[in-house]
Image (cartoon, helix red, strand yellow):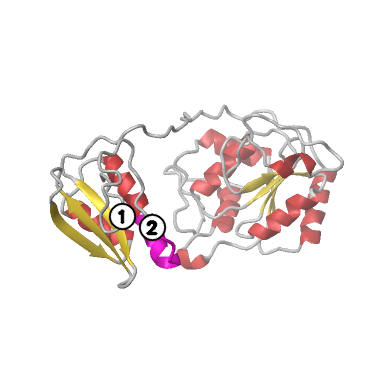
Amino acid sequence: MGCMEGDQPNWYTTLCPTAAPEDRPGWPPLPGDYQVVRYRAPVAVCMLNSTELGVELAQGAPEGLAIVGTLRTENLGIERLIRNVLGNPHLRFLVLCGTETQQAIGHLPGQSLVSLFVEGIDERGRIRGARGKRPVLKNIHQDQIDAFRRQVELVEHIGEEKPNRIQAYIDACMARNPSPFDGSPVDPRVTTVRATEPQRLVPDAVGFFVVYPDIRHRQLIVEHYTTDGVLDCVIEGCTPAAVSREIIDRRLISRLDHAAYLGRELARAECSLMTGEAYIQDRAPGDLYHRAGHKGQAKTRG
């Protein structure tokens, strides 16, 4: 639930039989793993790591439910949750259910969220009393946190995964629904840019690459050519990370767009190793070497 977006999925218009969902452009302001049920309901449900339970709850569409989603980190996840809740003044309750994120990696978003409600943050933005890996809120201001704690009442039932009990929590909140919250601070807008496909790739002065998976030896092979088409280095590795690091250490690439292109191709080649599907190196925009052919691969500037 730390993320929410304005464009609703196809099932959005058919979930609730008793109250027609209202499409609210701009709410929720941030994207993520959540499902919107209706805008003017008072209850948000955070299922922590219980994704399937959240889907089941949204499909049932209890009358008081506005949105249900997950929360997997105690920093960015909580920041997104706060901003999305503040974007809807009708939200007055936050039901916290489901299971915590795998503790092996150190994230405890549920415990951290409870600590935020009880103790707030210190002068560095760290949630007091939080035991998670990185419970520091860097993109949320104090006035936003204060408003969040005033706007919603936390109904904490970490570990609960029975839909009928969660429905009972929602019904109880709905029965004492106050009026919409008044006093949310203005959320600073972050610029959203629509990405477009590149029209051409500027040649890299260092040279270009040919990528192919070596299925026999279960490894990736990258050949580096000078701009004159002379092979000067062959790099072998088992993972894209290993190959990329060697390329960077040897300074065989000098442009960020080429690095991004090479990363995509290495990922595709690795997928070919794992699935056995055929791999043909993709054409780079404006490539002069497309279809020059090498070992069955399209020779492409990298």
Q: Which residue is mark 2?
A: 279
Q: Is disc 2 placed on a helix, strand or loop?
A: loop
Q: Nearer the viewer, residue 141 or 45?
A: 45
Residue 280 image point, x, y percent? 36, 54
Observer able to see residue 157: no
Q: Which mark is residue 253?
A: none
The residue lying at 24 percent from left, 40 percent from top is 255
The magenta span reads 266-279
Q: Is residue 113 above or below residue 6?
A: below
Q: Which mark is residue 297?
A: 1
Structural crowding at the residue carrying mark 1, measured as other residues with C-alpha within 10 Å and reported as few (<14), some (14–19) or many (≥20): some
Say left or right for 76 vs 295: right
Residue 144 image point, x, y percent? 56, 35
Location of residue 156 (image quadrant): bottom right
The residue lying at 47 percent from left, 52 percent from top is 135
Structural crowding at the residue carrying mark 2, measured as other residues with C-alpha within 10 Å and reported as few (<14), some (14–19) or many (≥20): some
Q: Nearer the viewer, residue 13 or 224?
A: 224
Say left or right for 129 vs 268: right
Marks 1/2: CA distance?
A: 8 Å
Tell me, yes or no, whether the highlighted magenta stretch contains residue 228: no
